[in-house]
Image: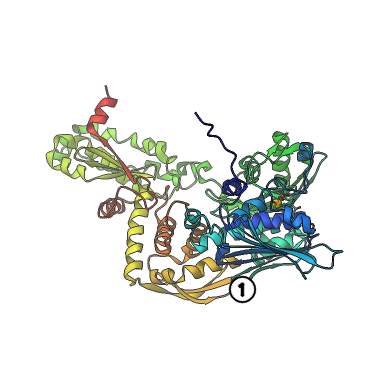
Amino acid sequence: MADIIQLLPDHVANQIAAGEVVQRPASVVKELLENAIDAGASNIKLIIKDAGKTLVQVIDDGKGMSVTDARLSFERHATSKIRTADDLFQLNTKGFRGEALASIAAIAHVELKTKQENDDVGTAIVIEGSKVASQEVVVTPKGTSLSVKNLFFNIPARRNFLKSNTVELRHVIDEFQRVALAHPDLGFAMYNNGSETFNLPVSKYRQRIVNIFGNKTNEKLVPVEEDTEVLKISGFVGKPEFAKKTRGEQYFFVNNRFIKSAYLNHAIVSAFDGLLKAGTHPSYFINLMVDPQTVDINIHPTKTEIKFDDEHTLYALLRSAVKHSLGQFNIAPVLDFERDPSLDPPYTYKSGEATETPNIEVDRSFNPFQTEEKARSSGGGRAAGYKKEPAASWEGLYVGLESKGTRTQQDFSEVHFESEESTPSIFDDEKQIEQANTTYQIHNKYLVSTIKSGMLVIDQHRAHQRILYEEFLKNMTIKEAVSQQLLFPLELHLSKQEIAIIKQLEEDLVNTGFVFSKMEEESLEITGVPVSVPESEVSIILEQLISDVENEVPDSSFSATDLLAKSIAKSLAIKTGQSLKKDEQEHLVNKLFACKEPNITPTNRSTFITLSVDELDKKFI
Ligand code: ADP
Ligand code: MG
């Protein structure tokens, strides 16, 4: 048989490599910004159009390239940054693989203009799909300008795979912010569709953070410093009371390179131990300077993961540095209100409440000779009366289960009587039917209800999400939501990007009942909210919404209306831990089964499970 193996032509190999290097416009942004930094630039400008789909351009004032280098830079494995394999362990540059420009040039229209300081003229090269279309001598300032147009023009499948502009822009901004945060000593600017999104002059680190995330950030930051032989830690953590429901503002940099590390994240979060409200995440902006020899950044193609030689020491140092800062800045005592209520003594031990213990006077009024029927149904005579006495301590036993502690003595007696009466009702047909409709709440989390074939266990939070989601979706699509006027306008301070997201969703928000009276660069004024939204929840809802847009699940198709309905439903749904009264429980169950898709949440998770009598029988074998 003939030989069948061939070497791939360069442009095909480049296209394949591009698949790994370039996933979306943001990947191009990252590579170009890093090249500019490696070139020693002090000012870097990023210009994008249509979230980078039409244009990504980076202009720097770095060292530029010679004519030969300009041409060579687009070859695969062409790099000026390493020469031998040993250099890999001494890296001081961002790039080293020499494949970014080659990959990008394989899948886009690229224009390079570059000039070195001492040259009179520079070089301009146009490359389209790996083919050099032109090369000229040009007059251009010192430094490099690289434009990447029509990304994926020759791979329609990849182009179609790109997300909405909102989502792609978010990714671009993420990359830009990461790079800008890692280099406060360089000036950055970003322009999107002709308007300035960021202008970040050279500044101190704190100022850089504030310039990116808005003025309100300043008061939230607590400095973290630690200088040891193996490592230097610097940066800021957010005060615990400003911890967010989302993980947005969490940044680690190792030797000025953004990295992700669940392990180091854990070190920081554990330093906040006991200071954070459940479900919130602290902000942090932490720089670690280590000897390049002790880290391996080469384990991940897009280089956001990293391997340290001595992770344990690093963990311990980081944790103690953060703990120290939180302590030093007196953060801890402020947070008294965040005390875990489950650590409180049961209410029966508190003064005042304890006197209620002998309050079970029900027993004394019990007269077995007067109410014959009741006596019979509860198992007979005086015995029933006595049976209730230990009930006082029974209540005590279950106090610990009430995580919210909102239940009153009366609620308990309600439960108590129900259970007392339902036992004998096994012999009573009428009552058995009644019992069939009864719901029980367990652990303030699940509702249990009986059905013909057995029982239902409903997750209260998820069930309510489904109900609200369908309601909101209906309101939005028929556009007749009712709005409640706020007595005083509500002003929210958000960052520029957050405002941009709200703008994008403005129409849908208005359809649900939001009324915006002002929308400025970093603030928002609201004068009306949907009737079902309590004023106190407004900022939480919008924050959740923004983070949902930012982290939109890659598979779902982007629909603002749908996302909004999901997001609001998630924020407003009854929480786990909330105790529900009988009628509220029943209402929830009925509403759930009136939904179009009662069995799943808007994000496709089960709202309830069923347990058939058969299954129960099996457990009793
Ligand atoms: P790498 O950054 O891994 O070396 P790239 O493909 O990103 O690979 O770049 C190839 C080479 O082109 C770099 O090593 C550098 O010499 C040169 N280069 C790229 N961008 C610039 C720039 N903005 N200024 C000066 N030189 C650059
Ligand atoms: Mg590079």
Residue 591 makes an appearance in the image: yes
Q: Position of residue 474 (x, y in %)?
A: 32, 64
Q: Which residue appears farthest toward the top when viewing the image?
A: 621
Quadrant location of the C terminus in the rendered image:
top left
Q: Which residue appears farthest toward the front when viewing the image?
A: 2
Residue type at mark 1: give it: Gly
Q: Is residue 336 left or right of residue 449?
A: right
Relative to 115, does residue 459 appear above or below in the rendering? above
Q: Residues within 10 Å of mark 1 (few under 14, many from 20)?
A: few
In the image, 579 versus 419, the foreground residue is: 579
Relative to 121, does residue 366 appear above or below in the rendering? above
Residue ID at (69%, 60%):
209
Q: Is residue 390 left or right of residue 498?
A: left
Mark 1 highlights which residue? 194
Q: Position of residue 353 (x, y in %)?
A: 45, 46
Q: Position of residue 321 (x, y in %)?
A: 73, 45
Q: Quadrant of residue 439?
A: top left
Figure coloring: rainbow
